[in-house]
Image (cartoon, rainbow, N blue to C red):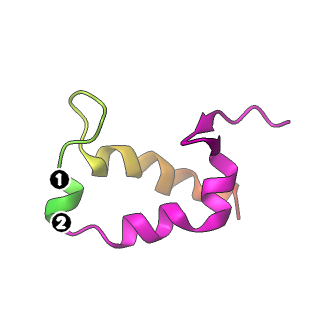
Amino acid sequence: MNGLPVFGGGRIENVVRSGRLVRAAAGLSGTGLRARSGLPGWTRGHVLAPVAHSVDTYV
């Protein structure tokens, strides 16, 4: 076990491997990236930025 948290009924690594996150992010427009996320004060772009910066860890 690598300690990654559970997300959406599965482990984050499973979401990354399945391509769901990439497909969802690729479908966002500029307006979609600026839209509010489920985190107070954070846009969807704010949420995706650290994911994008850490993707090299998974490659």
Mark 2 in CB contact with mark 1 (< 8 angstroms) = yes
Quadrant of the image occupied by residue 24: bottom left
For residue 19, above or below residue 43: below
* Circle 2: residue type: Gly
Q: Residue furthest top?
A: 40
Find residue 29 and report its horizontal and vertical position in percent.
Answer: 21, 69
Structural distance between the alpha carbons of marks 2 and 1:
6 Å
Find residue 57 and report its horizontal and vertical position in percent.
Answer: 68, 54
Check disc 2: other Cα within 10 Å, few if <14, some if 14-19, many if 20+. Answer: few
For residue 13, above or below residue 25: above
For residue 33, above or below residue 6: below
Which quadrant would the C terminus be assigned to in this image?
A: bottom right
Q: Which residue corresponds to the image point at 37% horizontal and 44% vertical from the top-left?
A: 47
> Magenta span has 54?
no
Q: Which residue corresponds to the image point at 53% horizontal and 64% vertical from the top-left?
A: 20
Q: Mark 1 falls on what kind of element? A: helix
Check disc 1: other Cα within 10 Å, few if <14, some if 14-19, many if 20+. Answer: some
Q: Which residues are magenta?
A: 1-29
The disc at residue 47 is: none
Disc 1: which residue: 34
Disc 2: which residue: 30
Find residue 15 and report its horizontal and vertical position in percent.
Answer: 61, 55
Find residue 7 and report its horizontal and vertical position in percent.
Answer: 57, 39
Q: Mark 2 falls on what kind of element? A: helix
Q: Residue furthest front?
A: 9
